[in-house]
Image (cartoon, coloured by chain):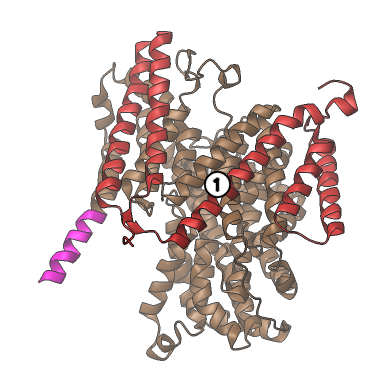
């Protein structure tokens, strides 16, 4: 399919208001403690599913970008990281706020986020076509290994250790066997429940795992509300923050690169990119600047926000080319697009090139909107972040019930949502990986189909999965991913002992 | 007075236990249904992986997880947490059970009013305004605009 540049520009212009709305909603969501881009996207899923695929995708990507920026508001003003990715922002932003420079910190975060999004957008636009061309050469054999790779990577990153991560992914794959077998159409795993004949409702499960599970945590923590540092927001200091960012182009580029690479790893995201970028910022800073770390360093503050927003563009690369979501929000996008019958993966760019490029280019529009809306929102940030948990919990719960109802149009969906929510709560509490479970559930059917297609190609022999240069390279990467942390730990112990 | 002992957190076994239970139930169901052997083989492979990883997680938890000495105050706190979660689940279950019968127009504001009251949101007029606003949002955004067929209940349609 020929991609028409004019059509892409038309799509972008037609969706500029969607980008603005998405960024604004994302920032409000990110600024509200207790809400993240993933749980709010999950709650809004019934609404997103009614939009056409292009509009829905652009809205979700813009919301994600806006939320990555919005997380900085409670981090700076309350010393509460809205998400793990903004934990680093508290280290530098809150000390600046205590010095009376909250506006400066907010200005740094706003422009850093905009630049991170811009650079992430540039690289994703350049790399998606190249990776798609490579991915088109993938047969069912390579696609099977890629999905396995994605699940292992997410499991590897889990705080609870690789075994908990693997169990989460395998549990998701097992849950995906509920419903008709993709090869022979045999009904299985439904336990005699007619509503499970089509499989576990994924949207209900997603809303439960990502959104409703948070309600239990918020319920327990609802009385912990920090005092807002009351400061008048100064536009002059905000723009001074912009100047501070523009004086540090090398810091921006380095943090953006880290964010892009980490964002492209399934399951990694800002919670890993931000600390890595921060640590690298310390390493490469001048001795005078190093003394400021932990006391309000602009370099440190920038590194977190640039890398956070570059992750958004980075995560789109495996999503569009390999149908591997880089984050929970991208997993929701995968579900939303499959609901419309669109299959992400190697052929997506050739079959829906205009839409894919419109989404990628909309990141530029989002970056400009972040700079514009961020300044306006900084002015009212103090009011937004003071929203009580006691008000949020019931409201989000009702929205989650509706989200659970949306797919099946029956109350059975809400029961699935409740059960998933409880499962998600225990998974988060004991350091299992809900995203790995979700990935297994969403990609399980595709994994099974590709596995059996590969077996047919190999005349029912598993040896076909270990033939060919691409398959062998992927296996090597997989084993390296599993073995590297253990080997590195052994090496460090040996160095310490010697 | 005896010194408090360090205790194992049995909650560590919830997720692996659930995974193993679900897998066993699913495999038994497939065997009873006499599904295609390749389908069973696939489920068996995933199941074997689950039993292996769950077993490792359980053994790791039993042997290596940190035992915590729980004081009387912590025990009281955990009872409060358990009660909060149980009550929240009970309210949610009541919402779902009554949704088909009473409809969203009654269950949504009722649920919200009970939750706001339980979470000490005051004054009463704030509770009423928030509940009414949420009902309006649900009606206009999800029912009217998105076309979601939320149950209207016996009061509005004459049948559940």
Could you say which is closer to the camera, residue A46 or residue A230? A230
At horizontal 29% and vertical 44% (from top left) the residue drawn is: A478
Corner quadrant of residue B138: top right
- Is A495 a magenta residue? yes
Q: Secondary structure at mark 1?
A: helix
Q: Colour of chain A?
A: brown
Range covered by the magenta-colored residues: A485-498
Corner quadrant of residue A455: top left
Subunit that carries the residue with mark 1: A
Q: Colour of chain B?
A: red
Classify residue B153 as left or right of residue A478: right
Inspect this view and state whether residue B124 appears.
Answer: yes
At horizontal 75% and vertical 53% (from top left) the residue drawn is: B117
Could you say which is closer to the camera, residue A137 or residue A76? A76
Residue A393, given in percent of the width and then of the height, sits at: 67, 53
Residue B127, given in percent of the width and then of the height, sits at: 82, 55
Could you say which is closer to the camera, residue A188 or residue B103? B103
Which residue lies most toward the top here?
A: B34
Classify residue A331 as left or right of residue A400: left
Which residue lies under the disc numbered 1? A330
Inspect this view and state whether residue A340 appears.
Answer: no
Classify residue A207 as left or right of residue A304: right
Could you say which is closer to the camera, residue B76 or residue A223? B76
Against A362, residue A171 (above or below) is above
Secondary structure mostly taken by the magenta-highlighted segment of the chain: helix
């Amino acid at each position: 399919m020929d991609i028409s540049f004019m059509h892409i520009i038309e799509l972008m212009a037609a969706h500029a208001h969607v980008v603005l709305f998405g960024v604004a909603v994302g920032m409000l969501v990110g600024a509200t403690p207790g809400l993240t881009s993933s749980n709010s996207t999950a709650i809004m899923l019934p609404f997103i599913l009614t939009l056409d695929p292009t509009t829905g995708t652009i809205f979700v990507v813009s919301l994600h970008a806006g939320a990555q920026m919005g997380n900085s508001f409670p981090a700076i003003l309350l010393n509460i990281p809205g998400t793990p990715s903004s934990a680093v922002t508290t280290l530098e932003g809150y000390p600046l706020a205590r010095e009376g420079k909250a506006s400066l910190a907010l200005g740094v975060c706003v422009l850093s986020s905009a630049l991170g999004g811009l650079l992430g957008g540039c690289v994703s636009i350049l790399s998606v076509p190249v990776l798609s061309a490579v991915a088109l050469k993938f047969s069912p054999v390579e696609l099977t290994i890629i999905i396995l790779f994605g699940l292992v990577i997410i499991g590897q990153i889990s705080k609870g250790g690789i075994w908990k991560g693997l169990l989460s992914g395998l549990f998701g794959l097992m849950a995906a066997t509920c419903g008709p077998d993709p090869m022979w159409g045999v009904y299985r795993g439904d336990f005699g429940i007619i509503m499970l004949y089509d499989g576990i409702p994924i949207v209900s499960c997603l809303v439960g795992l990502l959104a409703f599970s948070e309600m239990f945590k918020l319920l327990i923590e609802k009385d912990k509300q920090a005092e807002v540092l009351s400061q008048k927001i100064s536009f002059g200091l905000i723009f001074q923050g912009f100047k501070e960012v523009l004086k540090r182009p090398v810091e921006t580029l380095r943090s953006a690169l880290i964010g892009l690479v980490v964002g492209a790893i399934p399951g990694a995201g800002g919670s890993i990119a931000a600390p890595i970028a921060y640590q690298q910022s310390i390493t490469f800073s001048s001795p005078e600047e190093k003394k400021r770390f932990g006391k309000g360093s602009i370099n440190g503050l920038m590194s977190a926000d640039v890398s956070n927003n570059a992750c958004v563009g980075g995560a789109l690369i495996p999503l569009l080319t390999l149908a591997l979501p880089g984050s929970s929000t991208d997993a929701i996008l995968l579900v939303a697009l499959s609901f419309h019958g669109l299959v992400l993966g190697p052929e997506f760019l050739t079959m829906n090139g205009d839409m894919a490029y419109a989404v990628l280019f909309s990141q530029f529009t989002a970056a400009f909107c972040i700079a514009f809306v961020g300044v306006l929102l900084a002015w009212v940030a103090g009011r937004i972040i003071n929203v009580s948990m006691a008000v949020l919990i019931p409201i989000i719960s009702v929205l989650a019930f509706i989200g659970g109802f949306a797919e099946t149009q029956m109350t059975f969906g809400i029961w699935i949502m409740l059960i998933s929510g409880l499962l998600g709560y225990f998974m988060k509490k004991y350091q299992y990986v809900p995203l790995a479970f979700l990935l297994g559930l969403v990609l399980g059917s595709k994994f099974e189909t590709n596995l059996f297609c590969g077996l047919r190609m190999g005349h029912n022999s598993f040896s076909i999965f270990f033939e060919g240069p691409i398959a062998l390279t992927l296996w090597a990467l997989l084993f390296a991913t599993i073995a590297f942390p253990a080997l590195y730990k052994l090496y460090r112990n040996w160095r310490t002992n010697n | 007075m005896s010194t408090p002992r360090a205790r194992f957190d049995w909650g560590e076994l919830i997720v692996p236990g659930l995974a193993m239970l679900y897998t066993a139930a699913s495999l038994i169901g497939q065997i009873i249904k006499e599904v295609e052997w390749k389908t069973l083989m696939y489920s068996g492979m995933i199941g074997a992986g689950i039993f292996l990883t769950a077993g490792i997680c359980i053994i790791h938890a039993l042997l290596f997880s940190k035992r915590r000495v729980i004081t009387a105050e912590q025990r009281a706190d955990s009872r409060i947490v358990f009660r909060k979660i149980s009550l929240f689940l009970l309210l949610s279950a009541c919402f779902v059970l009554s949704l088909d019968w009473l409809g969203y127009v009654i269950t949504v504001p009722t649920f919200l009013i009970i939750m706001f009251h339980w979470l000490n949101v005051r004054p009463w007029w704030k509770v009423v305004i928030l509940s009414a606003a949420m009902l309006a949002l649900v009606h206009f955004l999800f029912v009217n605009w998105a076309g979601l067929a939320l149950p209207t209940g016996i009061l509005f349609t004459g049948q559940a």
